[in-house]
């Protein structure tokens, strides 16, 4: 057992040649300062240009006007119905796309017959602009929640299928053979080997899918809606209320960033041995 | 007792036009409680035969009988140790050892007990909560060995288990395997490329040749046991050197007969 002592994978503390602050700076501080600096310059220039009259606030708004608008919409509660309506559609559509897309991707990754049969459909659906289906979806499902959920589903579902399928194809054949040698049946191989192995790809797919879902929500709400962030943005646009347009954009961007960060965190937690880049 | 009866096996080549004959009409019997090595150059079918014995591969012709019963797939009386360890990266050492027990539907309490016991046997009692990527190669293969032992197999099938390890670690692992083996003397089928390893570990060395894969020699190794207590004395004994030279001569003959590459 002499090998243990030498190779014990104890995470040794970094040599204490520099202070904790200096190490934090190297790791995070410098990057964060650059980011904060860039954001400050950007928003400062925008605000300044607007106040100096170089930018017409009617067209370009300004950070202070946007914040003001957002604060007043939160204060009088008028923002919430829009946020909830959009969250509802995005959540339902995206949730369904995961529930349907992941099992379908697993099945297609596992069965060559199924993959060959369905590939023309997935390739075509992926290549086509799914937004174009909206008129059809409205004819089929009406102008209520269903057609909007369907559009969101269509947008993110195909990404879930393709990413899951790729994840399944990337599974180390030797691990499947090993499971089989230890008498695992097909179901156990699927649940205990393939699914955990494909998980980083599935989460990467979710990160892409969330972005697509948010786009689809906005598009669906432009068309036929009486509330929702998409509705809010386009109604405000028609009224030249640029501050309100930006309020909608900021909320959508914030939601995208938060969901993405959460999924990245989840990915690192669930699959610390592997980190897949979303493409 | 493992009986290999007239096993032939062919693989379709990558372009699908011809069949590569990995094994041609191979027969042998392996007595229970013996340590047998399969030795030979790459492509001689020794690993294929090990997988056929395990039940992972169905041979084109012939059959395997274990204790008189025909092999028709993997079973819990046989356990494999793989060259590349093949550990599940998302499971800890414990989780990996637990995997076959879980799959076979053994209750949690009993699983925990078995896992603790076999991790102790391979000297990893303190490393149960480590993930494979946190372990060295030698430690990973200890986990692989513990996983196989946990099943409680009568037959241990080892596919070049130390082939991916550093030479020093490899020799240490050989000693530990001998020590473990002396406790219960399971039947072991051990595939290796190394002449020294085969001679040092085995009661019997079966040599394979290529094109097609077949047995070219079958030698009993009559060295004293236990071998781990004074391995240096064994490895420098006249008998060991004689075995090694004899086998090396046969192997060289095989290698020379292979088509130039």
Image (tube, coloured by chain):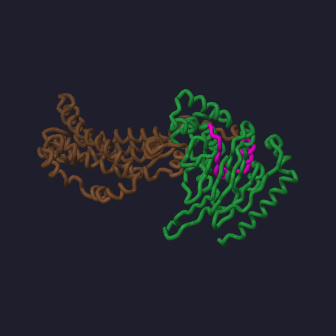
In this rendering, the count of numbered labels is 0
User: Would you place residue A35 above or below residue B245 in this image?
Assistant: above
Quick check: can you spot residue A11?
Answer: no
x and y, in percent, of residue A89 in the image: 23, 40
Q: Residue at x 35, y 45 (%)?
A: A103
Residue B108 or A266: which is nearer the viewer? Answer: B108
- For this orientation, the residue located farthest to the right is B238
B61 sits to left or right of A258? right
Which corner quadrant of the image does residue A236 belong to? top left
Chain A shade: brown
Q: What residue lies at 22% left-to-right and 49% top-to-bottom?
A: A54
Q: Is residue B65 magenta?
A: no
Q: Percent position (x, y) of residue B234? A: 84, 48
Q: For residue B158: magenta?
A: yes
Q: Given the current orientation, which residue lies at the most extreme bottom position?
A: B260
Chain shown green: that is: B
Q: Is residue B205 above or below residue B103?
A: below
The residues colored magenta run B152-176
Residue A66 as seen in the image, left or right of residue B179: left
In the figure, is residue A1 to the left or right of A195?
right
State the residue in front, A63 or B127: B127
Residue A79 visible in the picture: yes
Residue A112: where, in percent of width, then height? Answer: 39, 56
């Amino acid at each position: 057992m002499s090998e243990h002592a030498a190779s014990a994978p104890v995470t040794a503390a970094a040599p204490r040649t520099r202070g904790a602050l200096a190490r934090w700076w190297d790791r995070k501080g410098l990057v964060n300062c650059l980011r904060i600096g860039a954001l400050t310059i950007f928003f400062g220039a925008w605000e300044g240009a607007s106040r100096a009259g170089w930018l017409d606030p009617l067209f370009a708004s300004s950070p202070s006007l946007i914040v003001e608008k957002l604060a007043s919409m939160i204060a009088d509660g008028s923002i919430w119905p829009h946020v909830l309506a959009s969250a509802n559609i995005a959540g339902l559509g995206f949730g369904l796309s995961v529930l349907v897309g992941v099992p379908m991707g697993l099945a297609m990754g596992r069965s060559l017959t199924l993959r060959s049969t369905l590939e023309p459909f997935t390739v075509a659906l992926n290549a086509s602009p799914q937004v174009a289906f909206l008129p059809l979806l409205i004819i089929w499902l009406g102008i209520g929640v269903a057609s909007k959920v369907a559009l969101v589903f269509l947008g993110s579902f195909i990404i879930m299928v393709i990413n899951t399928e790729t994840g399944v194809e990337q599974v180390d054949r030797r691990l499947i053979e090993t499971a089989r040698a230890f008498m695992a049946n097909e179901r156990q191989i699927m649940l205990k080997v393939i699914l955990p192995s494909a998980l980083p790809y599935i989460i990467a797919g979710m990160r892409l899918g969330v972005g697509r879902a948010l786009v689809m929500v906005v598009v669906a709400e432009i068309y036929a809606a009486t509330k929702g962030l998409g509705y809010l943005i386009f109604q405000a646009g028609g009224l030249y209320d640029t501050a309100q347009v930006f309020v909608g954009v900021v909320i959508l961007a914030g939601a995208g960033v938060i969901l993405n960060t959460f999924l990245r965190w989840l990915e690192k937690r669930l699959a610390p041995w592997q980190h897949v880049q979303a493409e | 007792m493992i009986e290999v009866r007239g096993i032939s096996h062919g693989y379709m080549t990558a372009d699908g036009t011809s069949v590569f004959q990995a094994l041609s009409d191979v027969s042998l019997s392996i007595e229970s409680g013996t340590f047998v090595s399969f030795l030979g150059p790459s492509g001689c079918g020794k690993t294929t035969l090990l997988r056929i014995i395990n039940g992972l591969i169905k041979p084109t012709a012939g059959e395997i009988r274990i204790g008189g019963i025909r092999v028709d797939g993997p079973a819990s009386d046989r356990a494999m140790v793989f060259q590349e360890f093949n550990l599940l990266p998302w499971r800890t050492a414990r989780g990996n050892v637990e995997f076959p027990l879980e799959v076979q539907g053994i209750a949690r309490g009993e699983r925990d007990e078995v896992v603790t016991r076999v991790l102790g046997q391979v000297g990893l009692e303190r490393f149960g909560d480590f993930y494979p990527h946190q372990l060295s190669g030698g430690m990973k293969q200890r986990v692989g060995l513990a996983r196989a032992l946990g099943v409680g197999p009568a037959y241990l099938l080892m596919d070049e288990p130390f082939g991916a390890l550093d030479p020093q670690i490899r020799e240490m692992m050989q000693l530990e395997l001998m020590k473990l083996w002396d406790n219960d003397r399971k039947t072991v089928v051990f595939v290796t490329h190394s002449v020294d390893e085969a001679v040092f570990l085995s009661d019997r060395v079966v040599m394979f040749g290529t094109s097609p894969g077949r047995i070219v020699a079958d030698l009993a190794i009559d060295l004293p046991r236990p071998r781990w207590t004074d391995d240096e004395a064994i490895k420098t004994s006249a008998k060991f050197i004689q075995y090694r030279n004899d086998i090396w001569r046969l192997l060289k003959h095989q290698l020379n007969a292979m088509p130039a590459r």
